[in-house]
Amino acid sequence: MARTSRSQVEGVFGHLVRALGGHVAASHKDVGGWMLDYDAAYGGYNIERISNASGAVSQPFGSGRHSASEMWEMIRFGLMCLDMRAGKIAGYGDKRGSRRSRRSRA
């Protein structure tokens, strides 16, 4: 498997933020913006959302840090889930998957 670069992670992160209806923060004062925080000393990447103009952040996907390849895979998974929910992937969308719902349609 090829190595995942920082620019690849940042690119797919931008897609996730747009899919969520947000924007990538320009600075730590950009309230409501999303940031991809990276710190090698603490183990890699984490996603943060700016909470106020003083720079407070929340970590809506947890406080754990991940390597570039882990973060890329996690974000791609999230994007696929959002696409399925929106019906953008063939075979998914408004269809219900339980046996009970299939019986009720027959």
Image (cartoon, grey):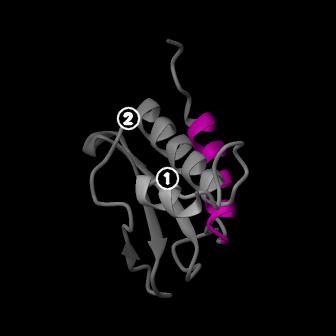
Q: Is residue 69 above or below residue 37?
A: above
Which residue shows up at 37% across the image and 74% down it? Answer: 58
Number of marks drawn: 2
The reply to whether dot 1 and dot 2 touch (C-beta < 8 Å) is no
With 20 as the anchor, is 75 left or right in this view?
left
**Magenta part of the chain:** 7-21
Which residue shows up at 56% across the image and 41% down it? Answer: 76
Look at label 2 and name its amino acid.
Ser
Which residue lies most toward the top here? 1
With 4 as the anchor, is 14 left or right in this view?
right
Question: Residue 27: which quarter of the image?
Answer: bottom right
With 8 as the anchor, is 102 left or right in this view?
left
Q: Secondary structure at mark 1?
A: loop
Q: Quadrant of the C terminus?
A: bottom right
Which residue lies most toward the bottom here? 53
Which residue shows up at 62% across the image and 66% down it? Answer: 20
Is residue 84 or residue 80 the one in the foreground?
84
As for residue 16 lying within the magenta part, the answer is yes
Residue 89 x/y as whole percent: 69, 45
Residue 70 x/y as whole percent: 40, 35
On the image, numbered disc 2 is attached to which residue?
67
